[in-house]
Amino acid sequence: MSSGFSGGMPDSFTADRRAVLITSNMNNSYSSNLTTQQQFSLRSTVPRILPDAAAQIRRKRSLDEFHQHQSFLQQQQNLGLYLRNVKPRPSYQYPSTSSVSGSFDSRHQQRHLHLSNRNGLTAGIRLPADPGFNSEKNTMNHRLQELEKQLLDDEDDGDTVSAITNSEWSDTIQNLIGTSQKLVSPSPTSSSSSCCSTSASPPLPCPKQASIDAAASISEGKPEVAAEILTRLPQVANASGTSEQRIAAHMVRSLKSRLNPSENPPPPASELFSTEHAASTKSLHEFSPCFKLGIMAANLAILEAAAEDGYNKIHVLDFDVGHGGQYGHLLHSLDSNKSSVALKITAFSEFPGAGDEKLKAVGDNLQALANKIGVPFNFCVRNLNIADLNRQKLEIQSDETLAANFAFKLYRLPDESVTTENLRDKLLRSVKGLTPKVMTVVEQELNTNTAPLTARVRETYDFYAALLDSLDSTVAKEDSVRVVIEEGLGRKIGNSVACDGRDRVERCEVFGKWRARMSMAGFQPRPMSQLTVEALRAKLNSGTRGSIVNEESGGISFGWMGRKLIVSSAWR
């Protein structure tokens, strides 16, 4: 069946459908604002829009033209919405209908005037005293009339061709928009608002999001964008401000090192092994409720394992004894139980010489505490050599409950993502060969090991902001101890964000990844008793509001305001 449409539909079907669509658009666009007489006049023209069969055959209007008609109608409505927001001026004079071309009868004049006012093409326009304005206005009106004639298809002769072709429609409407914008005389209020929006600098960014955006720009190879962000970020970073602002101050320094390491050298990894950092870590473990209770959970897991064995000797292998504060709590726990259990600690030194001397000093302090409270105690130091880890060389007795303690140690060992030597897994497998009764792990819940820079910045930001907030409940910001703690946290942030490869010591994992790594090394979870969980929960909730304690699969997590910070777990 032949048809004037490329789709091959019958002429009678397409003609009727076009008539319905055009009539619907006319009624929706105009009827709400027409008077009763105008609506009657408009309805009287509808039958003329429906051409007879002969006219359909003569015109053979294409389907593309029909869609262009509909598209233009939408454009014209959008133009009305655009100009309708212009504030009307009191001095405005509506143009006379005499400006409408004489080739249209009064019905066309009335509809054109209504269309112009309806769509806002004339509302709010001040006519300048320009000799060329009348000519420009007449040209615009004439083109609107031609567009309307095409749109409404209200012609006596279906063969008449408009002077405006389909290809000119989009250009025409854009020209009209441009012309109308030039003719609008904005009010002082709108002029002032426009000036503020264009001349004022962009709003200051959220410190966290700005840091993430800068990291993303660095990762994407856009140094100019990153530099611009880091230039503005110090405006919202404040070393003495809120937790978010203080973290931002550390982020600025770290990201500048990533962006331009020659001008801003990254912090040396040796800072994390300095005496100053050790003092900061000691204070953090003492004053942070989450760190303190994470260590206490490990001690309770050791005591539970010893109680199962029924032995009166506990031998703990500690691979990072630090300042020894963890074992002060363990000694007090043994004393409170009024048992005759003896405690032996074997500490490993990574740095022979000076490292040995530091560990011996820790041992002397613990020995003095044990003598004071009356607990049998022995402390020895050995150089760490993974190949030499066996029960004979470590002098492990058969009547000892053997425990291996990894409190904040494993995350500082390089894994397979750094070196093929993979010290992290190698040490775990060596300890597994010793068949300990229990192995305790305490780690920060932070995904910064293999995460890309952008994710690492986001994780670091959230973690340390929550940690600083939790410290507010135990130590004031102005306290000298708090200053020492935050200096240490700044070193940790700098190493995690600014450094890579062997220089990046801070390589934390979330508990799910630790669980998978323990399983690959041959360990199985050793859940802590419900009594231990409830005791820790009661102690944390009684001391600080906002802290959280949750049971994990084989461990306990401690956090602040919904953010997990520390996870303690036990394995066998």
Image (cartoon, rainbow, N blue to C red):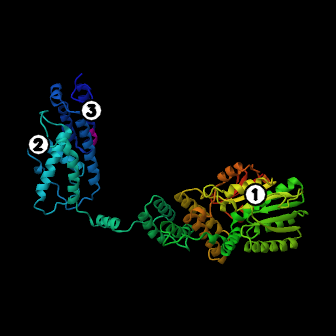
Give SS at disc 1: strand
Using the numbered discs, state the Cα–Cα distance from disc 1 to disc 3 in whole angstroms.
78 Å
Q: Residue at x 76, y 60 (%)?
A: 405
Q: Residues within 10 Å of mark 3 (few under 14, many from 20)?
A: few
Give SS at disc 3: helix
Q: Residue flagged by tag 2: what amino acid is it?
A: Phe
Residue at the disc numbered 2: 104
Residue at the disc numbered 3: 20
The image position of residue 235, as x and y in percent, is 47, 71
User: Image quadrant of residue 345?
Assistant: bottom right
Please state which of the two labelled residues, at mark 1 or mark 3, is closer to the viewer: 1
Dot 1 or dot 2: first in sequence order is 2
Describe residue 231's horizontal placement relative to residue 136 as left or right.
right
User: Image quadrant of residue 471?
Assistant: bottom right
Using the numbered discs, state the Cα–Cα distance from disc 3 to disc 2 in whole angstroms.
25 Å
Q: Please identify the residue farthest to the right as the structure is shown.
A: 340
The image position of residue 212, as x and y in percent, is 50, 61
Q: Residue flagged by tag 3: what amino acid is it?
A: Val
Give SS at disc 2: loop
| Span colored in magenta | 25-29
Please state which of the two labelled residues, at mark 1 or mark 2, is closer to the viewer: 1
- Give the vertical position of 372 relative to 166 (above or below): below
Describe residue 540's horizontal placement relative to residue 6 as left or right.
right
**Nearest to the observer: residue 146 or residue 348:** 348
Dot 1 or dot 3: first in sequence order is 3
Q: Residue flagged by tag 1: what amino acid is it?
A: Thr
Using the numbered discs, state the Cα–Cα distance from disc 1 to disc 2 in whole angstroms.
93 Å
The image position of residue 227, as x and y in percent, is 44, 67
Residue 220 visible within the image: yes
Would residue 28 be counted in the magenta stretch? yes
